[in-house]
Amino acid sequence: MNYELREMLPNDEARVLEIFKQGVEGGIATFETTVPTAEAWNMDYFNDCRWVLENETNQVVGWCALKPVSKRESFRGVAEVSIYFDNDYQGKGLGSVLLKKMILDSENHKFWTLQTNIFPENEGALKAHQKNGFRIVGTRKKIGKLNGEWKDVMMLERRSEVIF
C-alpha cells in the first residue's frame, strides 16, 4: 500500500480528533479521557510541525504534532511529541515514517529536544521512538491515574545532533 505524508490542514481536524478518540478509547495512548474540541486541540499544539499520513484513498490514517513543554523562553526548543494512528493502521511500521519527518521538521524549526511519555504497555510506540533515536530517560512510577488506576509512563527524549 502507498502512503502520502503531508502537512496537516485545517480540514483534517475532524479526522485527527477521530483518530485521537480511538487512542483515548484504547487506554494505552494517553491520560486523556475525553476528546477536545478542534479549537482546544489547536491551542495545545504548535502551528508548525503538524503532519498526517494518508492511505491510497486519501484518508488520514495517522498524525503527529508537537506541544510546548513550557512557556519559558529557555525551553523554546523543547517539545513533546504526539503521534496517533487509526486502529487499523497500528503495528505496520508507519510510526517511523511520521517520526522521521517530525524530527527533520522540528530541527528546521530549531527544536533541540523532543520528548514523549509512553505507557510501558504501548510497546509499539516505545519501539518506534527508540528506533528513531529516542532514548529512555526513565520510568515515572504512578505519575497519574487513568480511570481510577495508577499508571506509570516511560519518559523518552531525543536530542538533536544539528541544533546546538
Image (cartoon, rainbow, N blue to C red):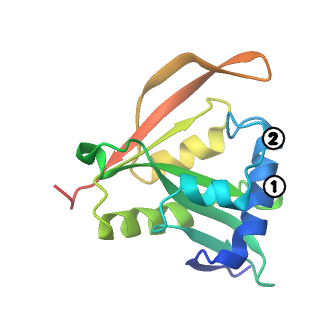
Left or right: 140 in relation to 108: right
**Vertical arrangement, residue 46 with respect to residue 76, above or below:** below
Q: Residue furthest left?
A: 164
User: Which mark, residue 98?
Assistant: none
Secondary structure category for the residue under label 1: helix
Secondary structure category for the residue under label 2: helix
The amino acid pointed to by label 1 is Asn
**Vertical arrangement, residue 6 with respect to residue 124, above or below:** below
The amino acid pointed to by label 2 is Gly
Q: Who's the residue at 30% across and 42% down the image?
A: 72
**Vertical arrangement, residue 9 with respect to residue 154, above or below:** below
* 10 Å crowding of disc 1: few (<14), some (14-19), many (20+): few
Distance Cα–Cα, label 2 vs label 1: 9 Å
Q: Who's the residue at 77% across and 48% down the image?
A: 35
Residue 120 at what x, y percent from top left? 61, 29
Residue of label 1:
87
* 10 Å crowding of disc 2: few (<14), some (14-19), many (20+): few
Q: Who's the residue at 30% across and 53% down the image?
A: 77
Which quarter of the figure is the C terminus placed in? bottom left
Q: How many marks?
A: 2
* Closer to us: 52 or 55: 52
Q: Who's the residue at 81% across and 55% down the image?
A: 87
Residue 60 at what x, y percent from top left? 73, 73
Left or right: 59 in relation to 65: right
Residue of label 2:
26
Q: Quadrant of residue 149?
A: top right
Which quarter of the figure is the N terminus placed in? bottom right
Residue 110 at what x, y percent from top left? 27, 63
